[in-house]
Image (spheres, helix red, strand yellow):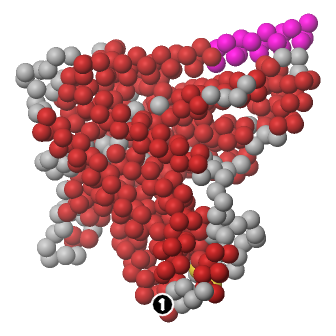
Amino acid sequence: MKHSLTKAGYSVTVALACTLLAFVAVTFIVSLTASLTPAFSPTNTLSHYTKSDMLHIMAFTLCQSLVSTVIALAVGLPAAYFISQRSWWGKKILLSFSAVPLCMPTLITAIAYISFFGINGYINRLLPQPLTFLYSFAGIVFTQGFYNFPLVMISVASAWARIDLSQKESALLLGAKPFRIFRTITIHQLLPSIVSSCVPIFLFCFFSFMIVLLFGAKGSTTFEVAIYQAGRAQLDFTNAARFALLETATALVILFVWSWMEERTKHTTGLSLKHEREQSSLTAKDYIFFIPLMLVITICFVCPFASLFISSFKAVKTLVLSQDFYRSLFNTLSIGVRTASCCTLCAFTYCMLCTLRQRKQKGTSLQSLIPLLPMAVSSVVLGIGIMKTLHQATETSLCFCQVALMWPFAFRQIYSAVETIPQNITDSALLLSPSRLDCIFRIYLPLCKNKLYSAFTLSLALSAGDATLPLLLNLPKSSTLALYVYRLAASYRFEQASAAGLLLGILCMTLCALTFTASSKGGNAHVL
């Protein structure tokens, strides 16, 4: 009797989880279809955009993404060298910066750079002639490049510390100079880690919205901003759909290339499995590059976030007494918990479907590509689709829209734990369990427990930091904390925006810290 009730409970739970996953899939497909189908309608004679405008926007989007990635690489590569090859007192501090692009929302980053490099920023108070580069193409790529350089740094440093030294030692014996060794040997060994870090950065910059919206001057329009302006401000859904189609197709190509390269370099042969090597201290020659690099990182990365912290103190009292702040905080947590719960459940359900299918037969490439599809669709594109489908969005539609976009991040967290479960354990469990459902609840669920926690906290952090969807859907009574910060910044109340942004940043970084803590107990973290 007890076994029958347990089996019935398992069946009901799985049925509800599969229904939720199917509903999220339908939400994604319907919204994306509604957003893209106007692209195939007859040309609008009153269009605000010509073909020349579209080509310019496409060129600007690709150009700013590429330049931002190059800046991140130019700063991240030498920083990775000093982390992996040299021993010095501030290494752990520099390593801790890698959490910023993963945890800090881009909106908060934009506020931080405005508070330091803006017209009324701290640095302009010290200069006779104010710097105005921030509100231009240079400001966009500058902010995005320095915001993302820690991703290159941590990825390349990890690989650099483990590369096989046999080829380098052989080259030294043959009389090769250090630079030639780096150019002909080391850079090729590091290439997989460089590509795997640069492709996500390029994609993040490609989907840039808040930074471009706040910094962009006339002519500084990316696909995201153009879609938002056409679909939301001008109600020109035909051109919004065409921009969305171009953006999504380009992002899909980038993601497929990234996935292919990750698969190719999964078992990299240039790594050494020996214990950690002894690292030498900084030499006199090192200081020639080390001091300018640390100075640049301090001014262009540390100071903006420090200025955000300082600026926030001036408006904390006003913020604490504001009812709008507490209402926004409550809405953020309420929407975030619902989004994170659905993301985790959908991710685990799809993970089990993939795993059990692979046990029966070799998994197809299609099932591994499905989690990539939402990552190729921006929140603006999906938000336009939701707006067209429902006309008036609700908190529930916002949650499902966020789940449709964010569940792949939770999936990568959980699937990394499933892959580490030994084959003999799962085979024995399948043989001894009365059903596959029993195996899921008694074996997979307990073994993936830590990754489920990390997937939940990561999804909650992503939801809390999302200002784009709440801005686009324009919920009348459900302003989130991220949207509250954006509205303060848009009305030039930068001190209050800094205070609210700092609290939002602390919330997101705390959630990400919990993510990394849970991940460290259950295997390596896969956030990107």
Q: Which contiguous range is marked in magenta?
A: 1-17
Give how far across and how far down residue 371 sits, in percent: 54, 32
Q: Residue furthest bottom?
A: 284
Residue 169 vs residue 102, the one in the foreground: 169
Mark 1 is surrounded, within 10 Å at the Cα level, by few (under 14), some (14 to 19) or many (20 or more) other residues, namely: few
Q: Residue furthest left?
A: 46
- Secondary structure of the magenta portion, mostly? helix
Give how far across and how far down residue 277 sits, in percent: 70, 76
Residue 422 vs residue 214, the one in the foreground: 422
Q: Which residue is mark 1?
A: 285
Q: Can you say which quadrant of the picture contains the N terminus?
A: top right
Specify whether residue 473 is in view.
Answer: no
| Amino acid of disc 1 | Lys
In the image, residue 156 lies in the stretch drawn in magenta: no
Identify the secondary structure beneath mark 1: helix
- Residue at the image point whose x is 26% and y is 71% from the top: 123
Specify whether residue 247 is in view.
Answer: yes
Q: Quadrant of residue 450?
A: top right
Relative to 277, residue 300 above or below:
above
- Residue at the image point whose x is 50% and y is 64% from the top: 153
Residue 179 vs residue 517, the one in the foreground: 179
Q: Quadrant of residue 421?
A: top right
- Residue at the image point whose x is 90% and y is 24% from the top: 431
- Left or right: residue 321 versus residue 134 is right
In the image, residue 16 lies in the stretch drawn in magenta: yes
Total of numbered circles in the picture? 1
- Left or right: residue 86 versus residue 68 is right
- Residue at the image point whose x is 63% and y is 50% from the top: 266
Give how far across and how far down residue 395 sits, in percent: 42, 23
